[in-house]
Image (cartoon, helix red, strand yellow):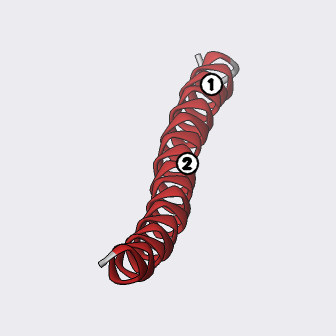
Amino acid sequence: MSTSTPTTRSGFSSLGKRALAVVVLLVAAWLLLKVIVGFVTAIAATVAVVVAVIAVIWAIRVL
């Protein structure tokens, strides 16, 4: 009886480690996605501001 208990505990421990690894990977992927989206948003906002400034300068010259 006592020989099957470590095997069962080892099985649960392995399953627990695997579940923890999946959770860690999901959290890391979510954080990475948030960083990438934030970076792309920052670049897009900067480009939009530059284009707006160029448009204003062009409009002033045309008038």
Tell me where residue 7 appears, x and y as whole percent.
67, 21
Image point 29% across, 78% down: which residue?
A: 63
Quarter-of-image position of residue 48:
bottom left
Task: Please state, as top left, top right, bottom left or bottom right, where the N terminus lies in the image.
Answer: top right
User: Nearest the camera: 15 or 55?
Assistant: 55
Secondary structure of residue under mark 2: helix
* Few, some or many residues within 10 Å of mark 2 (<14, 14–19, 20+): few
Tell me where residue 47 appears, x and y as whole percent.
51, 66
Image point 61% across, 40% down: which residue?
A: 21
Numbered label attached to residue 49:
none
Residue type at the position of mark 2? Val
* Few, some or many residues within 10 Å of mark 1 (<14, 14–19, 20+): few
Against 24, residue 63 (above or below) is below
Return the residue found at the far front. 63
Against 35, residue 5 (above or below) is above
Numbered label attached to residue 2:
1
Is 55 on the left-hand or right-hand side of 12? left
- Residue matched to label 2: 24
Secondary structure of residue under mark 1: loop
Image point 47% across, 60% down: which residue?
A: 44
User: Nearest the camera: 18 or 32?
Assistant: 32
* Among the two numbered marks 1 and 2 on one chain, the one whose residue lies closer to the N terminus: 1
Against 7, residue 9 (above or below) is below
